[in-house]
Image (tube, helix red, strand yellow):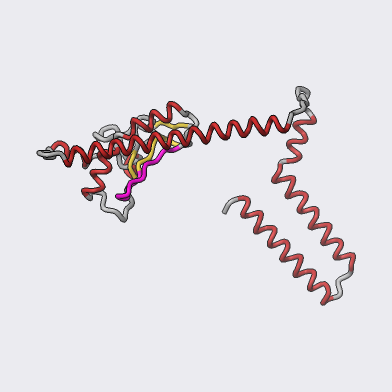
Amino acid sequence: MSVTMKWLVFFLVIIKSCTTQNSRSHEKGVSNQQLENWTSEFGRMLYELSCSVTKYKELHNRFQHSNDGIVEKFDLNQMIDEILDEVNTFNSEKITAVKQLSAFAQQKAYEYLDKKSSDGYVETPEETDKKKKYYNAKMVQQMNDSLPNYVKLVDNAHFGEMVNLNLSTVHVPTSIYDQDENILEAIFWSKDLDVAFTSNYKSYPTLSWQYFGSSTGFLRQFPGA
């Protein structure tokens, strides 16, 4: 349970308790003084809770003992305009990255389908074997450097976990057979999306996770993890 939810439950319990006590007070003839005491106690608890959540006292002490603080006036309208510009730029970068990834995915899918449908095309044993090999996200964490498909993961503060910025990994739900021919084919041609993933991340470093979801049922994510 989150901290916010815990405090919400706490408030509900307090309010319920006060309501119950109030109704009982009329039944038992509780004095107005006792009601005032309960009200004061409830107010004190709310004040302490608000101070704890907002860290008011800590912030107050920091400013009280700070000699380097400088008070400046801000133009609110200008500040809002600057924030809007930053948000628009951020959203524009994300939209551009998604469009580039979409266009690249369509191109690679068409190239693969055109190749398969061309006259005289016969899949070689090597191609068949390659389709069955991919970086499975479920296995990446369990690999060691002695395995052929080993993926080196490095702790990355931007993503908050161990990742590989040079490739993507594939998630196939347990309810789907991961050796299905249609899935393997889509995984095979979509591996080239790593080019678009890495290009997007280099162009827009603020990007977080990038995904490609296939209608066959798998999810490819970048960076690999």
- Image quarter of the C terminus: top left
Residue 105 in view (yes/no): yes
In-front residue for pair 88/218: 88
Q: Is residue 25 above or below residue 144?
A: below
Residue 212 belongs to the span the image colors magenta: yes
Residue 175 in picture, x, y percent from top left? 31, 56
Q: Is residue 179 above or below residue 12?
A: above
The number of numbered discs placed on residues in the rendered structure image is: 0
Residue 22, picture quadrant = bottom right
Describe residue 126's horizontal placement relative to residue 191 as left or right.
left
Residue 87, picture quadrant = top right
Describe residue 182's horizontal placement relative to residue 153 as left or right.
left
| Range of residues picked out in magenta | 209-219
Q: Is residue 12 above or below residue 161?
A: below
Q: Residue at x 62, y 50 (%)?
A: 3
Residue 188 in picture, x, y percent from top left? 25, 39
In the displayed orientation, state which residue is furthest to the top: 68
- Image quarter of the N terminus: bottom right
Residue 23 belongs to the span the image colors magenta: no
Q: Residue at x 43, y 34 (%)?
A: 97
In-front residue for pair 125/110: 110
Describe residue 14's horizontal placement relative to residue 143 as left or right.
right
Residue 24 in picture, x, y percent from top left? 79, 73
Q: Residue at x 39, y 34 (%)?
A: 100
Residue 88, picture quadrant = top right
Residue 225 in view (yes/no): no
Residue 46 in picture, x, y percent from top left? 76, 53
